[in-house]
Image (tube, rainbow, N blue to C red):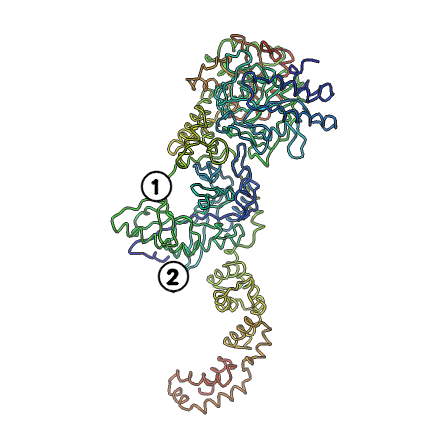
Amino acid sequence: MTTLHDMSVAELAQALQTKQVSAVEVATAFLARTGGNPHNAFLDIDSEVTLAQAQASDARIAAGTAGALEGVPIAHKDVFVTRDFATTAGSKILSGYRSPFDATVVQKLGSGVNAQVGAGMVTLGKVNCDEFAMGSANENSAYGAVTNPWNTSRVPGGSSGGSAAAVAARLAPAATGTDTGGSIRQPASFCGITGIKPTYGRASRYGMIAYASSLDQAGPMARTAEDCALLLSAMCGADLDRDSTSLNVPAENFSAKLGDSLQGLRIGIPKEFFGDGLAADVRTAIDAALKTLEAQGAKLVPITLPRTELAIPVYYIIAPAEASSNLSRFDGVKFGHRAKDYTDLVSMYKKTRAEGFGEEVKRRIMTGAYVLSHGYYDAYYLQAQKIRRMIADDFQRAFAECDVIAGPVAPTVAWKLGNNASDPLADYLADIFTLPASLAGLPGMSVPVGFGADNMPVGMQLIGNYLQEARLLNVAHQYQLNTDFHNAKPEGV
Amino acid sequence: MTAPKLVQGYEVVIGFETHAQLSTQSKIFSRASVAFGAEPNTQACAVDMALPGTLPVMNIGAVERAIEFGLGVNAHIAERSIFARKNYFYPDLPKGYQISQFEIPVVQGGEVSFFLEVGKETVHKTVRLERAHLEEDAGKSLHEDFIGQSGIDLNRAGTPLLEIVTQPDMRSSEEAVAYAKELHKIVTWIGICDGNMQEGSFRCDANVSVRKPGEPLGTRREIKNLNSFKFMQQAIDYEVRWQIDQIEDGHAIEQATVLFDPDTGETRAMRTKEDAADYRYFPDPDLPPLVIGRDWVERVKSEMAELPRVMAERFVKEYALPEYDATLLTQSKATAAYFEATAKACGQPKLASNWIMGEVSRRLNTGEVTFDNIPVSAAQLGALIARISDNTISNNAARQVFDALWSEGGEVDAIIEAKGLKQMNDTGELEKIIDDVLAANPKNVEEFKAGNAKALNGLVGPIMKASKGKANPAQVNALLMKKLG
């Protein structure tokens, strides 16, 4: 048997179901790897809780009532609220906060929602992220930056940087992430792993601390498309009683649809994704991946997504607008941080929020409050909503000519820590290829396709039409059957 | 339309915003109970407390009540309305925003009509509604019991409200109160609100301004939280006088929100326009547009009780009642039901209406009695009216029977018998009395014959007395004319 931490989710599930290994053994092996918190990936670990969950998994396996992924460990991004672990969303303002309930996604991957059987996964702990998921480098966490397992002087991407680093460094076989403007796809790309953001509304947002409600989506991050299919099958499904934006579509078994051949598949290549802003090393890796897909029978179709550049201002109006309102509940009154010395109510609010929020969060709250203000609303927020609809329409025109869209996830490989610290705009611009699908609510994923400068991983983005996650996973899986990039390991792991 | 009543030469302009708490079991966006009076924070769930990760889910029952209201006031029910966030910080507002409806409300337009007494005239008035929208209530700040601190009770947070907004159509405090009473009647009649003003289930804010006739609208001040009809009138009257005094003294009215203090009888400004917050409204991304199909509206309509307006129209048609009677009889479901049962029992709808608006309501107004525990049943009143209309008893006698029924109960015919109130319909007996009276009063007879019609009264009185009130006055008149004619 392969070393436990090198096994995929699929392999671990198989080994657990056939009782080659116990859930407690698996959990113990992974917990051991998290000692010393490599890459600052974890924010909360509680081995007692994890082992208790593993014991419960072992009992269910013994009783024959095991879930689909019973006993396989998973780490949850710290924006998912959990009863058994602290939840901070990477913010000081929620320091030590403990939720009285688990997020729907956590329940579905774990012991289940109400009477419904869950996947039976064991929670290893909570992983680091940019504060309230705002960032592209995981440098905005109140609990310190996360480092990239491929080169610890580099960022892991963000905002699900802890999730990506944990999977890449084999600290967890899988992690949950959330993606508002690329927060699953970009760190997956930077850390050489596979991640998928499903169609907006596929996975319940209940228990996901909201950043930008109309964009936030949960998704899995793992090493392979096959693993992502298993995880996404367990995560998705209508949650109409708790999330009004949940789509009323049944859960799907994505794993059953990985086998289709790519023969005749039309892959749309948006010319706007291959312009001057794309780094040469990334372009080389993407071009090679597209050749591989062609060799597997796919046809490349040139398409255009003419408003790609507009996605940046549109996103950085809508997301901060929603965030400025979503984050109002963090006021020091009911939970989380409250400033010590204040003179009256307003001073309590001001001090609490000034102390509790980091720079980037404050910047977005102010931007958001500004674009929603009387007299500015029409020029900014309303205009952005109009262009958002046009961006979605552009995709529909493109999908008339192709089945999936492929291109880079990010213009460059992971940059050095501290590189963009003084220039938030540089971070914003790096989101250009992931923002359009987010604004349209389309599913998108990142697949490792090689290495660029300084041997840093490069991810290819696949974008599908609404509810076409199965097709994306199918393309990625077929690609991974013919390539080995997803199995590459950072040095020393 | 009558000319508006002026106060010191000024026209008063009033618009209303009313928050009606909808009578659902659970909150508008969560499943927590809305029952009144529980221990603080025992009826606030994770959603109401705005714990991280929670999301709102629309309570369909609240939407149905909004639809019922829209139907009740002849409004347009929007097929697609939008929930918006009203952003502001306050400790009893857990999310830091209130979910409300801003640009596209669920109920659009509509009207409320009522009668009111102006001097000796009865005037029919219609107030146009601008809109009614769904929103959630905030929690409560408890400033007593906590020295140097404030307590927060979130039991009320998330309670469903329908905010009903009028056009500035009212021209006096009397009209304003009559509107509020009519609106109160409508929401309680339909059953979408319990109407309990003490518990805050029906809260009115009045926007008041004054102007010289023909001039554009003056600057308004909003009187908040008028929670009794009595205070409502006092507050508006005070506010009108205050505004006129200000203008007469050369001061401009500044837009403001004011509170009425029942102890001093004065209004006092809470905040002025300068403090007005920018609420940064925007569509709530957690809630999709509220879509109400025609079939849903039709279903709600078919399940609704007959509306007071519709019932009044039916009373006019079916019972040939004047519109005024029909409107008064449909002031409450109980009144209407009592009327219909009485009318059916006696077959004399107009008489039934007269009795209910007269004798019955006089007694209801004086005592602790309501239609729920009224001692005279509709069947008894119907039987009584039947005895009037078949000339068995006079109106006077009927009042005596009614008194007996009210205080002692019993059966109408038995009371008439026992009290000997039956009208003298036997012509022979009556003629004998008349002849006796005529013989005993020759002077009156002479005067009458000489052309003094009033002299007849001096004859009718003694005849009625001699008959112990049992004579039928109409019959007495007829016989007298025959004998003297």
B45 shown above or below B239: above
State the image coordinates of residue A298 (x, y, percent, origin top left): 61, 14
Report the residue at 25% width, 50% height from top. Answer: B249
Q: Is residue B222 visible?
A: yes
* Quadrant where the N terminus of chain A is found in the figure: top right
Report the residue at 54% width, 70% height from top. Answer: B406
* Quadrant where the C terminus of chain A is found in the figure: top right
> What amino acid is found at the position of numbered circle 1 in the picture?
Lys
Q: Which residue is mark 1?
A: B273
Query: In which image quadrant can residue A50 be found?
Result: top right
A207 shown above or below B449: above
A159 shown above or below B107: above
Report the residue at 56% width, 54% height from top. Answer: B305
State the image coordinates of residue A342 (x, y, percent, origin top left): 41, 34
> What amino acid is found at the position of numbered circle 2 in the picture?
Val
Q: Which residue is mark 2?
A: B118
